[in-house]
Amino acid sequence: MTRIVFLGASVNWVPRLMTDLLAVFPEPLDVHFVDLDPAPAETCRAWGEEANRAFGRRDRYEGTLDRRAALRGADAVLITLSTGGFPAMANDLAIPEADGIFATVGDTCGPAGWSRSLRNHAVFEAFARDFAELCPRAFIANYTNPMAYLTGLLAQSCPNPVVGLCHAYFETRDVLRDLLGLDEAHRPDVAIAGMNHFTWVTDFTVGGKPGYPMLEAVLAGRSLHDALPEETPDEIGFVSGHRLCAALFDAYRRMPYPADRHTVEFVPWGVAGFPERRDVLYQAKMPYEELARYGVRRTAIRHREAFQALARTHLDAVRDLPAGSSPRRSRETGADMIRAFLLDAPVTDAVNAPNAGQVPWLPLGACVETLGTVDGRGVHPLPAGPLPDPVVELIRPHALAQRWLLDAMRDRRPEQALEALRIDPQCRALDPDRVAALYDRLVAANLPFAPVGFLVRKETRP
């Protein structure tokens, strides 16, 4: 039996990814849900038993706290966890606000993403050691943010094929398809490059014909804002507007990832400098704080808690399926990549992987997002085309900050970790002493959740 291990029994990810696996692997699977808390591990195991009934399968499911036992001999591992959970993430959002930084998501870049990287680093280092010892040939699919940082850490720390996966790619394709008025049978072929949650369309084609000239013809001199839908939901259900996406396209004539809730954190003028905010009541259900400039709503902790409760209803939905049902695929591609590796049946899609030259205009070693092919030999990123120089310079500091922090954490060098925070565009308006004070507050907030005592600067120690 093919042995599948989930590190993190996520009520949000397990139903989606597990159903995809059942759809592409007709033979029985041996599935292990690993968590520090036995309750979600048991919940996911029980979901598996219901899936066996609904889909007429004979898969084996186990919920466990014993990570090493589960990993021994694994064929594929999916990572779907968040060290510290919502209490730790609340600090990531709240602490930088004293310096005027209003993170809208807070899981990728800026001080919040920097802090989240610290908290997950030791956990992922331990994972990498276990992979190397217990399942050195297993395919590793990482879904945990910061996607680029943690995927890069795994890729440099274990011998396994490693890929970071996100649904940004097909969200971008959907927006282009809608702009051009295409149906599902005529989706554009899209090439991307950049960082996770800040990719750009280097080029695209429709039926073999260049796509950007088609898009310019549709716009006929108008702003992209006039043609875009007001907002769209992502695969998880979070809603994002597109006003910033339109502004960036109008400036640079290249399409960015259209989810403004992420993109706004990457541009220097987006969330820093005490931006004007306002309270809104979205769909008359729940209050949000919103950036006045682009109308981007913050995904606060209370909203994440509400979405997690909704995810539990999706988890329970399998119970209502009649026996003999067929697994319904999501649009996530992790299951396809696992199958491609294990059966040597190549598939090409968006991948996050360390830059070994596939994006020549970004620093080597930084983890970047491009198209890539997965086959029985591993993950093979494909060369990316060019982007306008101003766009490159929007992306570059994030790539440098990620690489510097990864090196700093690996070598236990707090002074370089501080420099990685200083060069992040969200911190550029702060003087060096204020960034150092922000560093100290974030490190202190993470001490209850992660072994980051080596980052405490000597001048701040009691």
Image: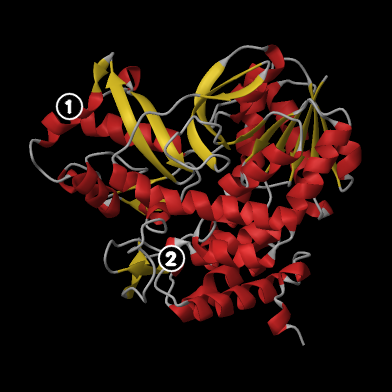
- Give above or below for 373 relative to 61: above
Image check: 376 left or right of 66?
Answer: left
Taking depth in this image into account, of 366 and 370 the one nearest to the observer is 366
C-alpha separation, residue under disc 1 versus residue under disc 2: 34 Å
User: Which quadrant does the N terminus fall into?
Assistant: top right
In this figure, which residue is indicated by the disc labeled 2? 426
Give left or right: position of 158 versus 190: right
Q: What residue type is labelled 2?
A: Gln
Residue 305 seen: no
Please name the residue that numbered disc 1 is placed on. 213
Q: Residue at x 51, y 45 (%)?
A: 236
Three-letter code, disc 1 = Pro
Residue at the (8%, 35%) spot, across then down:
220
Q: In which quarter of the image is residue 430?
A: bottom left
Secondary structure type for disc 1: helix
77 or 30, nearer to the observer = 77
The location of residue 20, given as percent across then percent down, is 61, 27
Crowd band around label 1 with a 10 angstrom C-alpha radius: few (<14), some (14–19), many (20+): few
Measured from the top left, where is residue 323 in percent x and y? 68, 24
Q: Residue at x 54, y 57 (%)?
A: 107
Classify residue 28 by image quadrant: top right
Closer-to-camera residue (399/253): 399
Residue 98 place in picture, x, y as percent = 48, 81
Q: In this view, does 79 lie above or below 161?
A: below
Q: Which residue is drawn at 73% across and 46% down?
A: 9
Q: Which residue lies furthest to the bottom in this view?
A: 462
